[in-house]
Image: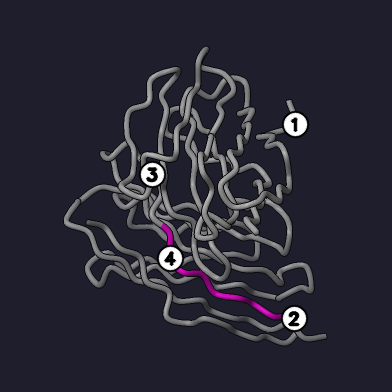
């Protein structure tokens, strides 16, 4: 296992289009997190899964955002009707128990 | 709500010298974790060092050490013998025992290392 993997690395989309990102966590990690990072800022929490259950969602996660982790392994984050304000780096992290979080390289979204 | 503040947007250090990055946080919890993460340009975030709040001893990892002052809610990172590869954005982060154990990050400090 080579760590947390995110695809695609970069996505350019037109405003109003839908986009979907994928995160493959470290295989034995039952906890998976999504964060959003805008330029020059620290990551902000979006949502959290323990196994397949989505246990917490930030108020940052508007109705246009949806995340799933159907089998408790990989996760997807979908943004519908993208807006320019959605342009950011979307980071996925996973961990097990009390361990630290391991991050993927992120998906950079640009909405034009 | 927990908050993390990094008051230094940017720091510079000469190669082989020592630099200290500052971090303060606010919480009403008595037990929690604190972290320093490093994010090189266009690369993934990696853990530098971790501190459990119940431990009075400051964490150390090779050239990296922290000064954890629980009463003052301060958690600074000291990098000794700075190397060019230390140049990155550094984030201080808090993780409580509740709230899904998510990380709360500061805004980050850009560290530049001069040769």
Q: Is the residue under label 3 in contact with that under label 1 (CB below 8 Å)?
A: no
Q: Position of residue A96 (x, y in %)?
A: 49, 28
Q: Secondary structure at mark 4?
A: loop
Horizontally, residue B55 falls left or right of residue B106, namely left
Q: Position of residue B26 (x, y in %)?
A: 25, 64
| Residue beneath the point at 39% across and 58% down | B57
Q: Are marks 2 and 4 on the same chain?
A: yes
Q: Which residue is mark 1?
A: A2
State left or right for residue B2 relative to residue A103.
Answer: left
Q: Which of the chains bears the disc numbered 4?
A: B
Residue located farthest toward the left when viewing the structure as drawn: B28
- Mark number, residue B16: 2
Q: Mark 3 Cα within 10 Å, few/some/many (few <14, many 20+)?
A: some
Magenta residues (range):
B105-113
Q: Which residue is mark 3?
A: A61
Viewer-side residue, B84 vs A76: A76
Q: Toward the viewer: B5 or A6? A: A6
* Vertical relation: A47 (above or below) B80: above
Q: Who's the residue at 65% across and 47% down the image? A: A106
A26 over B44 or under it: above or below:
above
Q: Which residue is the extreme one toward the top? A: A71
Q: Which mark is residue B106?
A: 4
Task: Work out how far the residue at label 3 is from the one at label 4, CA to CA, in angstroms.
Answer: 20 Å
The CA distance from mark 2 to mark 1 is 32 Å
Element class at badge 2: loop
Q: Is residue B112 magenta?
A: yes
State the CA–CA distance, disc 2 to disc 4: 26 Å
| Label 1 chain ID | A
């Amino acid at each position: 296992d080579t760590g947390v993997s995110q695809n695609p690395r970069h996505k350019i989309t037109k405003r109003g289009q839908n986009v979907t990102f994928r995160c493959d966590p470290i295989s034995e990690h039952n906890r998976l997190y999504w964060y959003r990072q805008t330029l020059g800022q620290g990551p902000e929490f979006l949502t959290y899964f323990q196994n397949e259950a989505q246990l917490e969602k930030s108020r940052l996660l508007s109705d246009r955002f949806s995340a799933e982790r159907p089998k408790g392994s990989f996760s997807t984050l979908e943004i519908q009707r993208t807006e320019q304000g959605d342009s950011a780096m979307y980071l996925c992290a996973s961990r097990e128990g009390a361990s630290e979080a391991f991050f993927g390289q992120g998906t950079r979204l640009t909405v034009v | 709500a927990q908050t993390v503040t990094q008051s230094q947007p940017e720091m510079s250090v000469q190669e082989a010298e020592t630099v200290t990055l500052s971090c303060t946080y606010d919480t009403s919890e008595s037990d929690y974790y604190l972290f320093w993460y490093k994010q090189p340009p266009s690369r993934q975030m990696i853990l530098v060092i971790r501190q459990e709040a119940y431990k009075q001893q400051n964490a150390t990892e090779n050239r990296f050490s922290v000064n954890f002052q629980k009463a003052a809610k301060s958690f600074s990172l000291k990098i000794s013998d700075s190397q060019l590869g230390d140049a990155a954005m550094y984030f201080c982060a808090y993780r409580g025992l509740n709230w899904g154990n998510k990380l709360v990050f500061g805004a980050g400090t850009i560290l530049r290392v001069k040769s």
